[in-house]
Amino acid sequence: MTLISNDSAWITIQETPLSLEEVSEFLRVEEAGAVDIFLGTTRRWTEVEEKETDRKTGRPETVLLEYECYKPMALKEMHRFVNEAFSRWPVCRACLLHRIGEVPLREISVIAGVAAPHRADAFAACRYLIDTLKTRAPIWKKEHFVDGDSRWVEGDSAPEHLSSPDTM
Amino acid sequence: MTLISNDSAWITIQETPLSLEEVSEFLRVEEAGAVDIFLGTTRRWTEVEEKETDRKTGRPETVLLEYECYKPMALKEMHRFVNEAFSRWPVCRACLLHRIGEVPLREISVIAGVAAPHRADAFAACRYLIDTLKTRAPIWKKEHFVDGDSRWVEGDSAPEHLSSPDTM
Amino acid sequence: MGDKKLQSVQVLLFSVIREQAGIDSTTLQLDPGEAVSAGLLLERLAATYPAIRPMLPLVRIAVNREYVPREHMVQAGDEVALITPVSGG
Amino acid sequence: MGDKKLQSVQVLLFSVIREQAGIDSTTLQLDPGEAVSAGLLLERLAATYPAIRPMLPLVRIAVNREYVPREHMVQAGDEVALITPVSGG
């Protein structure tokens, strides 16, 4: 695997807040006319809660998410996703940033961003980055509820489809 | 037509630079876990230039874009697109902002942003906003080249398909 | 004066067709009680500003800030805009 | 000591399976020259930490930071990670 280590890719995992301004500054280059940026944020009710609404008496509110990762492998995977995006679409710049540790309500846990000459490619590559990150990167989130309870969010990945990098 | 005038939509046309920070602050609400933001920026070479490369000796570089609009109708149309996005997808917040006048290289001419509980809806609604804006909103751009020349960018809209709002 | 204003249609031009015509707006007069199709109104305008004629096949017409088909009947007091293919974003 | 290290496999656990096992890493010893499948290695681990057994069907295995099938042969010096369904983003 060739890691993109030049100026056109930016990949990081950090415990501190992610800066959208820095992402915008990185992505806006003269060669690109279209920039798509996806932000994942901590929401008060999660998907798991929604699914379970009908069989619970109440919906405990989430007050923060806590992320844990297998950092060296997660970074390696994130580089792989970005490399793949560059090979599939005409992309000028791409970034994939994840925050770990505690992420309070409304704050940003992940940013996927792509700059391309045209918008169809920017949208497609950005979507690809966040979709692959969510199914493949060894990162986990734990919900902390307002009542003090907590639980690991059940991932929805399908191991049989993803056991090898070649089956992506 | 019902205009969305509440806090969940933000639509504007302005001559001053657009602020991505304000957009992020507006879109990141506790109910949303997914935010997609599209930025249109001024690029050094435009689509028209690319198409004409083979029959020109050189590619004049663009140094800035200049936008003109039929403001009351453009705002009305932009409200319509945002209303439609709210009716088609589960969306928490949406914004559609356009800068007019001169927009130099790398600067942002348009921002479409959508916050939704889930990412598929955020991507789809954001794509819808920018696609409809580009085909329907009465806004025009003029390229100014490094050699002092300028020309209006040929739009690619198809009048026969868009003569009535009902045919969207 | 009041009557005359009621019989007039405001026409707005933008971007390339504005530059070709050399005006960004004009007023067309209708006879009392007259209504003309948007398409016919374009023809009248092209008679006065022949430079815009080559662009007419590409022009969309908006009346009172809504796109309308060429058969749409324009009446006194309407605001008509000539929308060449848009290129915002 | 040096020989022993060469015969060992480092195993890493994260999130829910880490909490169930009560450890975030452990070392498994191989006999000299031995290689075992990733699947068998999981079984050995579950013998020591039975609380993780219910999760094993969902676990993906990574060896040296790459996902591998369960038939993949693990060797001394490898870094093995147990990846429960991920939920980043």
Image (cartoon, coloured by chain):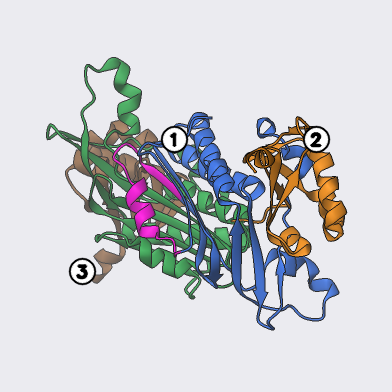
Chain colours: A blue, B green, C brown, D orange
Q: In this figure, which residue is indicated by the disc labeled 2?
A: D37
Q: Residues within 10 Å of mark 2 (few under 14, many from 20)?
A: some
Q: Residue furthest left?
A: B148
Q: In this figure, which residue is indicated by the disc labeled 1?
A: A4
User: In the rendered structure, are the residues bearing label 3 and label 1 in contact, judged by CB atoms less than 8 Å apart?
Assistant: no
Q: Which residues are magenta?
A: A16-36
Q: Secondary structure at mark 3?
A: loop
Q: Secondary structure at mark 2?
A: strand
Where's the N terminus of chain C, which quadrant? bottom left
User: Which chain is disc 2 placed on?
Assistant: D
Residue lying at 48% horizontally and 75% vertically, measured from the top left: B7
User: Which chain is disc 1 placed on?
Assistant: A
Residue A21 coordinates in the image, percent (x, y): 35, 58
Could you tell me how far apart the alpha carbons at marks 3 and 2 are, in whole angstroms? Answer: 95 Å
Type of amino acid under label 3:
Met
Badge 3 and badge 2 in a common chain: no
Badge 3 and badge 1 in a common chain: no
Could you tell me how far apart the alpha carbons at marks 1 and 2 are, in whole angstroms? Answer: 32 Å
Type of amino acid under label 1:
Ile
Residue B48 coordinates in the image, percent (x, y): 32, 30
Residue B46 coordinates in the image, percent (x, y): 31, 34
Q: In this figure, which residue is indicated by the disc labeled 3?
A: C1
Could you tell me how far apart the alpha carbons at marks 3 and 1 are, in whole angstroms? Answer: 72 Å
Residue lying at 37% horizontally and 46% vertically, measured from the top left: A27
Q: Residues within 10 Å of mark 1 (few under 14, many from 20)?
A: some
Residue lying at 57% horizontally and 47% vertically, measured from the top left: A74
